[in-house]
Image (spheres, rainbow, N blue to C red):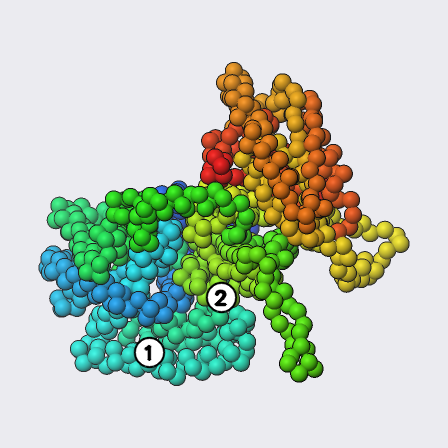
Amino acid sequence: MATTTQTVTATLLSTVFSTVSATTSTAAAATSTNRATPQAGVLDGANPIVYNASNPILLFIVQAAIIIIFCRLLAYPLRYLGQPRVIAEVIGGILLGPSVLMRIPGFQTNIFPTSSMPVLNNVANLGLILFLFLTGLEVDLRLFKRNWKVAISVSIASMAIPFGLGYAIAWGLYHQFSDEPGTLPISFGVFGLFVGTALAITAFPVLCRILTELNLLGNIVGVTVLAAGVGNDVVGWILLALCVALVNNDSGLTALWALLITLGWALFLIFAVRPAFIWLLRRNGSLQNGPSESMVCVTLLLVLTSAWFTGIIGVHPIFGGFLVGVICPHDGGFAIKLTEKLEDFISALFLPLYFALSGLSTNLGLLNTGITWVYVIGVIAVAFFGKIIGGTLSARLTKMFWRESVSIGVLMSCKGLVELIVLNIGYQAHILSQRTFTIFVVMALVTTVATTPLTKLCYPLWYQQKVEKYRRGEIDWDGNPTNSESSRDRESVDKLNETQVRRLLVYLRLDSLPSLFTFISLLGGSDASNNDAIVVGKNESGQEPQPQVEPPVGPPRRHLQVHGIRIIELTERTSSVMKVSEVDELARRDPVVNTFRTFSQLNDVAVSGQVAVVAAASFPETLATEASETSSDFVLIPWGDKVADDPSTVVSATSSVDRLHDRSHLEFVYSTLEKAVCNTGVFIDNGFGGAASSAARGGDRPMLSRTISVMSMHSARNGAILPVADKSHRIFLPFFGGADDRVALRFVLQLAKNKNITATIAHFTWEGSDATAEISRPEQAHGGYYAEDPTQAAIKNKVAALEDEPSAQDLGLLATLQSSLPAALADRVTFVNITARGKGSSVLDSVVECASKVVGQSKNAGDIIVVGRRHSRFGDNGAAGEASSSSYDLSKTIGVAGSHIINASPKASVLVVQATSRDAKA
């Protein structure tokens, strides 16, 4: 009995425990199921790369970071091959896609899962809409109107032939790949229309960057390609809109209605929205001063509204964004300034995502059959030869040369960004399968990569220069000068006899305007004595005085002609490229150029000013070309704080060490002197014209002492600056002999014609057998630029010293100028002879000592030390271009004498003069 009772009790307890355990487990499971997401993230053990539909931002950040970093790493080496960044972005997407990295197990599942792609796709498409808006801003219809004849002929021919060939090859593509997965059953007409459009369109944004890199935007080839590219772009988008409308609508009649509504929307934007938009911009001041924050918001709302409208009628939303960009005004630089506010964010984040998505959809593994590769080669051949033949023949009919015509055809074959956008639209609309999409992506990459090298091959720099001289009538087609022998001899005699600077080219910089203005006023006023005399006479009644002009005595005055060029650095930004195409308008409203024009005209100087937008490496070549085209006698280059000069940035204080030893600026000055085609001067300002001294420029701030409060310091710093009472300038020229010193001497004497200038010309006679022994270069001890065999260096120095000895020509020039000085100059120009003994550094110390006794002795309008650049006895090895440009320092750039004087911190500005080869032989 007891045993039975124990058995029943054990069974009951076991049942109760089992029930309780089951209930507890069920409750725990329910609790676990209903539990909130861990808020500590990875601290609670959460996986940071697992896609969560309710919080997709975490995985999106990882995806965006991988794409951007990967594309940037690829863009760096491709940039040195002259390839646009879109190539790196597409190749990066291909490498991240099923062709390479997605073959790694788990890569796609964890990094690019299929469920996360809609989020990435939405962000990329938003960026695409904004990018097409910027593309519309970049399209300047005024360029098309100015060159409409050649633009229409080239545009039509370069579209018609590739469109026809594309329609033909589409027949084979349609019957070979139309039944593949991912495609819709469409008619051959629609498929042929899409393929023809894809092969006929030209990538206008990439084309602008290639033309800019090749420095062709101001060339007849560049202008023709840009004008034709505008028409090509607009027509291509219209054809693509028609194609998408036909695919997205069930019947042809519906597609026609969609196209007509799109046309009506475009007309509404042009004739209704655009005038109201411009009126609002003028009223807001954004058209004159750049878009305000509210106007940027209004513009973006217009873009999104237009994109939404074209999307709901069956046309892709990107067309709406493009149309708003086209209607935006270019007056006052509004389009450029608006682009500057948007471009960096779009190009840095949105575009890499979109074009990487193109690569993710590209599977090179599908190109696995012989017939597929036949079509790959066929599509590439059609894309190349259709464009090249059409562009070449049409350009040749406009009487261009063959090389120019072929170059236009090659440039028009560029695909790039626009082609990839077209292909993605076709892929999303299920017109293209993944295999045909990959075929066309390969074609786009090949044609874009080949554009730059083929253009360089067909249209080299030497040919461009030859054609320009031929069109100007300077040479015949064989390269022979067209001038007669007698006229050339007469021009040579005139140039040798001309010792005065009559045409001055000035490199305009915002941070150097005060010193440049002083120089122009001194040179422009040097012939003031030849002005017409204004006297007061009486009329016939003898009552009212009236001004009369008395004829001048002697020959009529020749006005100084000053040509100013402002160089703006060209970058990869869209706004920078737009500045190149609108450079004429930019020159009319550039504040630095306009200030220069006004000041020069007020000082009775003939003036012209222009703006050039070029890459930083092309600054020296641009100055040399401008000097040649303007037949300048002298080029004045101010030494700035940096190579690029942007008036929109705040001028920051720069120490004298950073200012004089910045590598990029040293390289710029050295290259400019190396490429110089006329006499050139490098001016290092130190308070010339009453400007801030080098100490102030160097950022030396007043120290806060106990007796000066912050308010009192602020008041003193912002107090009114009184004008300089003493308007005089003192000039000191150490003359050792040589071509550079002779040009410097003539330049000083021309400046001395101004009554406010007194000059001291110190002729140094050097006594010493080993003058160069003590002049050393910093790189010699480290095997740098100047490292060479000591024996060869000694031979060179001896030969150079003999060539640089004061020649009979130097002594005769000094004697002639000293004896023939006009009476007006004799009182203000002093010639002194100084005998220098010892080694090179001792002589230069004597120069500094003598200069300190002449300049910086009073608070006047600024003094100058003028010095020749090259003196062989100091170790300056001949002409600027004789040495390698692998290393730069101050003494190499402006010469040992100039460097020694500047390092001595004189209380004066320094002008370093280099003679051109013509004057070296004079």
487 is higher (above) or lower (below) than 777: below
Of all residues, the one furthest to the top in this rendering is: 791
In percent of width and height, residue 718 lies at 76, 61
Q: Amino acid at mark 1?
A: Ala
Name the mark on residue 266: 1
435 left or right, relative to 559: left
Q: Residue 575 occupies which quadrant of the picture?
A: bottom left
Question: Gap in Å between the C-alphas at discs 1 and 2?
Answer: 32 Å
477 is higher (above) or lower (below) than 919: below
Q: Residue at x 20, y 57 (%)?
A: 396
Say which residue label 2 marks: 588
12 is higher (above) or lower (below) than 730: below
396 is higher (above) or lower (below) than 189: above
Residue 690 visible? The answer is yes
In percent of width and height, residue 809 lies at 55, 32
Q: Residue at x 37, y 57 (%)?
A: 218
In percent of width and height, residue 860 lies at 75, 51
Of all residues, the one furthest to the right in this rendering is: 707
In percent of width and height, residue 71 lies at 40, 49
Element class at badge 2:
helix
Q: Residue at x 13, y 45 (%)?
A: 370
Callout 2: 10 Å neighbours few (<14), some, many (20+)?
some
Residue 391 visible? The answer is no
Q: Amino acid at mark 2?
A: Arg
Closer to the camera in the image, 92 or 647: 647
Can you tell which of label 1 and label 2 is closer to the viewer? 2
Name the mark on residue 705: none
Q: Residue at x 46, y 56 (%)?
A: 612
Closer to the camera in the image, 597 or 168: 597
Element class at badge 1:
helix
